[in-house]
Image (tube, rainbow, N blue to C red):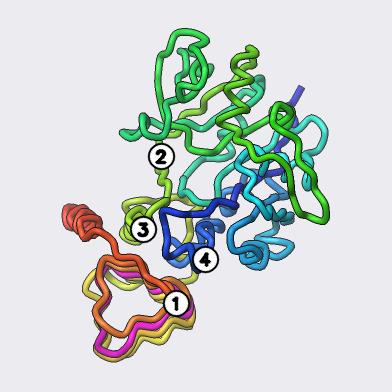
Amino acid sequence: MAKPAVTVAYVLAAGLGTRLRPLTNERPKPLLEVCGTPLLEHALGLLPSAGIRTVAVNSHWLHPQIPAALGASFRGLRVVTTHEPEVMGTGGGLRGLAAACPAPPGERVLVLNADALIDLDVRALLGAPDDALATLVLKDDAETARYGAIGTDVDERIVTFAGRVAPRGPVARERMFCGVHVVHPRAFEVLPPVTLEQGVVRGTPSGINDEGYPRWLEQGALLRGFDHAGTFCDVGTPERLLEANLAVLTGAWHSAALAPFAGLEERPGRVFVAPSARVHPSARFTGPALVGENAEVGADAELSFAVVGKGGRVAAGARVTGAVVQSFAAVAEHTGAAIVLPNSRAAVDVDVVDRIRQDWARRPVR
């Protein structure tokens, strides 16, 4: 008997993004961009080819920017949104999404965060054994201890959960949780209930990792791990956001689901220019760069390891090196090691740019 399809996804997008301030005083974290594409769109880009038909997204901070950005559909996905006047945590957020957009009977749901980059093979994840209450995407990472180690046995059964529950068996591997999981909706039943009225969610905040999964493990439920060997980046600080932009720009990170260069003209040296961009003939590209839709680069400007988003502007004579000018932002002078929004900017340690430059210089083929 074939297992039921997974056709519904829940995307958690209600976080405050405090470590990204002042950028997140202006835009919610999921709408910050990697190579001109909002993080939220990168997450949603994983879904259509995996058979997902409906996505539900929650929001809190700077509402209603997220629902306004999505509308009622996105690349063929039906979109449902909820709003949390008080941030409800991952647990309350999921209960609200499940109330607003229940999965068809017998189906599991795909859950993922809107504020991370991952090149996950979602089809393979959804095709994994469905005998567990939940299957969590896990990755070997040097920062596993900081995120909270998830221990699995030799059969990928989860036996420890970030120190929140006594071991349920011998640990064969410890990895970090990437925030992507396939879940039977009954897993949410141990979390405090919420109310939903006209898309607004209220109730007691809770966390699926703090209260949900540890409780299920204590009750003997089967949780499984799914190993992910590819890229994962929690884009939680300006440094990580800049690193993600430059790594995607230079090709150090690649995924079929991440397509920020689609429709752009590619020039030598990994320079990508949108057909609608206005680049002065005297402008120079001295390293990889992306110039997005309706962006403008003035006379004698110089771009190197730089991203200029949709509607961005680089003034005549300005130099943008190791920096990201997000959509509709503008720079009029030398800008390096920074993320720039229309009304704010965040400086970044220049070591981030130097690491990307060194990696680029070591590559024999570009």
Is 277 placed above or below 344 here?
A: below
| Image disc number at residue 27 | 4
Q: Quadrant of residue 360?
A: bottom left
Between disc 3 and disc 4, whose residue precedes?
A: 4
Label 3, label 4: how far apart the Cα atoms are:
13 Å
Residue mark closest to the camera, 2 vs 3: 3
Q: Quadrant of residue 337?
A: bottom left
The kind of residue tagged 4 is: Arg
Label 1, label 4: how far apart the Cα atoms are:
10 Å
Between disc 2 and disc 3, whose residue precedes?
A: 2
Label 2, label 1: how far apart the Cα atoms are:
33 Å
- Residue behind mark 1: 342
- Residue behind mark 2: 230
Q: Is residue 307 magenta?
A: yes
User: Which residue occupies the foreground of this view, 64 or 171?
Assistant: 64
Between disc 1 and disc 4, whose residue precedes?
A: 4
Question: Which type of secondary structure does the marked residue at label 2 adopt?
Answer: loop
Q: How many marks?
A: 4
- Residue behind mark 3: 238
Could you say where residue 185 lies in the image, as x and y percent from the top left? Answer: 73, 32
Dot 4: few (<14), some (14–19), or many (≥20) neighbours within 10 Å?
A: some
Q: Which residues are magenta?
A: 304-321
The C terminus - image quarter: bottom left
Question: Which type of secondary structure does the marked residue at label 4 adopt?
Answer: loop
The kind of residue tagged 1 is: Pro
Residue mark closest to the camera, 2 vs 4: 4
Dot 2: few (<14), some (14–19), or many (≥20) neighbours within 10 Å?
A: some
Decide if residue 360 is on the left or right side of residue 57: left
In this view, the residue farthest toward the top is: 169
